[in-house]
Structures are given as structure tokens and as C-alpha cells.
Amino acid sequence: MRVALLLRGVNVGGVTVRSADLRSVLSDAGLGDVVTVLASGNAVVTATSASVAARTAEAALEARYGRRIRVLGIDVDALAAVVDAYPHGEDDAHTPYVVFELQPGVLAPLVDVETSEDEATALGDGVLYWSNPKGSTLTSAFAKASERIGRTAKGDARDATTTRNLRTLRKVLAAA
């Protein structure tokens, strides 16, 4: 089966994982037909299941980089369903995001966060859809509330979610 792997917290101030290195690490770990997508910690692999692919990738990345890197594994058909279900309109003034839950229950409190007039959120199955004005990803009302709620989540808050631009997810699917 084809599985999309979305790495959490790489190439954005954390550890740098170059595409060529990611391909090599994942291939050496036994994942098949590895394709990397952009320089933002995305890959598509062949594996027996999404959970096996994610665990294999996490172990291989930790061995290579000396620190835990969370990986979301999602079957490409399931990812396509997430992308197709994006409920907000798309335009040049807003950035469409999908926030994936890496820790069960962490997204539920975010649905009730009061957003600005130009933002929109909607809860999906294990994801939260978010549309916000371009240039306000880190400063919007939702972003600030998300960070605050993340800090109160069980465990390491940095590991609670991973977020992708909807356009990036479409590129991941195209690479599948």
C-alpha cells in the first residue's frame, strides 16, 4: 500500500532533514518506492500499513539524527479523503491548512477557540481544517490559542499535532 509520511518539526528550526537523506534513511529502513516531496519532511512510501511505516520511519530517523522525530503515517486514500473534505473556500488571500492529530483528543478543544472574522476552523476525523489570512499563521487568534492549548496537552506539546498546507498535501498525493 502507498503511505504518506509527514514528519513533525523538521526543517523549521528543529533538525534539518534533507530530501536525499530522508530518501536514504527510509529506503535503508526497508520502506519501498520512497519518494520525497518538497523540502518539508514529506515522503510517500510502500509499506504493509501506515502505522508500520510511521514506526519504522521514526526508529530510523531517531537512529540517524539522535532525537525523536514524530511521523504521521496515513494511507494515501485516507489522505485524499482528508484533502477532498476541506470545507473552506480557497482564495489568494487565505492559507488553507490541515492540522493532524498526533495525540488523541488534542484537537477537540480547538474547535471552540474564538477565531478572527477572517479565520475559519472545522473539525474532521482526526484533523482540524483551518483557513487563515495570509501572513498571520503564527499571530492569528487560532494560532495563539492552539499554541496555548498545545502547552497544556499531555506529554510533549510539540508532538501533539503536525500541520500541512492543503497545497502541499495535494503535491504529496500527486507524488503517490
Image (spheres, grey):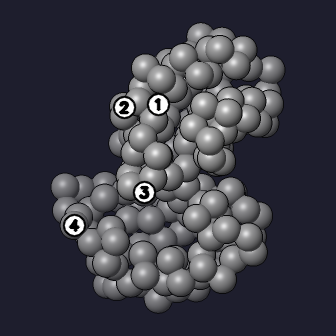
Sequence-first disc among 3 and 4: 3
Disc 2 and disc 1: Cα gap in Å?
Answer: 9 Å
Disc 2 and disc 4: Cα gap in Å?
Answer: 21 Å
Q: Is 19 left or right of 47, judged from the image as shown? A: left
Disc 2 and disc 3: Cα gap in Å?
Answer: 16 Å
The numbered dot on residue 125 is: none
Classed neighbour count for the residue bearing mark 4: other residues with Cα under 10 Å, few (<14), some (14–19), many (≥20): few
Q: Does residue 162 lie above or below 20 as drawn?
A: below
Quarter where residue 66 is shown: top right
Sequence-first disc among 2 and 1: 2
Sequence-first disc among 2 and 3: 2
Instruction: Tell me where residue 111 appears, x and y as whole percent.
Output: 58, 78
Q: Which residue is mark 3?
A: 97
Q: Which residue is mark 2?
A: 38
Secondary-structure class at tag 2: loop
Amino acid type indicated by mark 4: Gly
Please give the name of the residue rendered at 51% of the width and 26% of the height, measured from the top-left corner: 22
Sequence-first disc among 1 and 3: 3
Closer mark to the observer between disc 2 and disc 4: 2
Secondary-structure class at tag 4: loop
Quick check: can you spot residue 128?
A: yes
Q: Which residue is mark 4?
A: 135
Please give the name of the residue rendered at 73% of the width and 35% of the height, measured from the top-left corner: 59
Circles 2 and 4 in contact, beta carbons < 8 Å = no
Amino acid type indicated by mark 3: Tyr
Instruction: Tell me where residue 31 appears, x and y as whole percent.
Output: 68, 17
Classed neighbour count for the residue bearing mark 3: other residues with Cα under 10 Å, few (<14), some (14–19), many (≥20): many
Disc 1 and disc 4: Cα gap in Å?
Answer: 23 Å
Instruction: Tell me where residue 125 appears, x and y as whole percent.
Output: 69, 57
Please give the name of the residue rendered at 43% of the width and 82% of the height, measured from the top-left corner: 144
Quarter where residue 101 is shown: bottom right
Q: Nearer the viewer, residue 84 or 12?
A: 12
